[in-house]
Image (cartoon, rainbow, N blue to C red):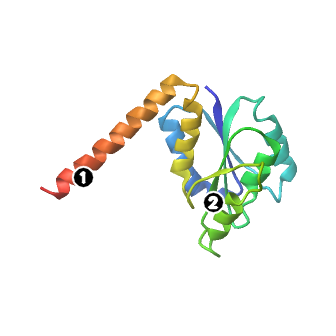
């Protein structure tokens, strides 16, 4: 199975990123987590991104706040799918990060989830890997069924 890289711009992003780490772990997806900055360690970001495919990664998740250029810089150096998680910051409640992540120029796509949407980033990565992995696709289908059952149980409990 291909691995998922999770890159965050700062260790302050870890409380949000943990949701992605936990979700990927629940599905048995091997994950590697790193702290790299598009602005403070651009050479590290470039080197990692350029070698990610040959190092057996299948998807890269990038979490960053404020200017949030990390996902875009990674996408510039790889043809692997990149999923951006805009992180809520103190200045604009994450709107700055959302716009920085989602407004990529034509030709360099970044899939973008909601502000602080780490769980959905992990699920999207799992969906991408499940295209070629039948066991993972089955786990994902079971997860969807379980979600439906949870909602039905909550509906029953509220009406009893």
The numbered mark at residue 45 is: none
Asked which secondary structure carries label 1, the reply is helix
Asked which secondary structure carries label 2, the reply is strand
Residue where numbered disc 1 is placed:
154
The percent coordinates of residue 88 (x first, y second) are: 60, 66
Quadrant position of the C terminus in the picture: bottom left
Quadrant in the picture for residue 96: bottom right
Q: Residue at x 51, y 23 (%)?
A: 134
Q: Residue at x 55, y 25 (%)?
A: 133
Quadrant in the picture for residue 113: bottom right
Q: Is residue 1 left or right of residue 67?
A: left
Residue where numbered disc 2 is placed:
86
The mark total stands at: 2
| Residue count near mark 1 (Cα–Cα under 10 Å), binned few <14, some 14–19, many ≥20 | few
Quadrant position of the N terminus in the picture: top right
Relative to 98, is 48 above or below? above
Q: Is residue 128 left or right of residue 58?
A: left
| Residue count near mark 2 (Cα–Cα under 10 Å), binned few <14, some 14–19, many ≥20 | many
Looking at the image, tell me whether mark 2 or mark 1 is earlier in sequence order: 2
**CB contact under 8 Å: marks 2 and 1:** no
Q: Nearer the viewer, residue 149 or 109?
A: 109
The percent coordinates of residue 158 (x first, y second) are: 19, 58
Q: Residue at x 69, y 59 (%)?
A: 101
Q: Residue furthest left?
A: 160
Relative to 98, is 141 above or below? above
Q: Residue at x 54, y 55 (%)?
A: 117
Q: Residue furthest front?
A: 106
Q: CA distance from mark 2 to mark 1?
A: 30 Å
Quadrant in the picture for residue 52: top right
The percent coordinates of residue 60 (x first, y second) are: 68, 42
Q: Residue furthest right?
A: 43
Q: Nearer the viewer, residue 1 or 104?
A: 104
């Amino acid at each position: 199975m291909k691995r998922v890289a999770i890159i965050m711009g700062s260790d302050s992003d870890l409380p949000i990123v943990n949701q992605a780490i936990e979700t990927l772990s629940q599905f048995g997806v091997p994950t590697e987590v790193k702290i790299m900055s598009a602005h403070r360690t651009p050479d590290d970001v470039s080197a990692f991104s350029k070698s990610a495919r040959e190092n057996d990664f299948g998807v890269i998740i990038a979490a960053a706040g404020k200017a949030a250029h990390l996902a875009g810089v990674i996408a510039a150096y790889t043809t692997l799918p990149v999923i951006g998680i805009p992180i809520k910051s103190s200045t604009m409640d994450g709107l700055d990060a959302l716009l920085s992540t989602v407004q990529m120029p034509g030709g360099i796509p970044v899939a973008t989830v909601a502000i602080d949407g780490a769980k959905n980033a992990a699920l999207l990565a799992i969906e991408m890997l499940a295209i070629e992995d039948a066991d993972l696709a089955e786990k994902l289908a079971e997860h969807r069924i379980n979600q439906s059952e949870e909602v039905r149980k909550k509906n029953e409990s509220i009406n009893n």
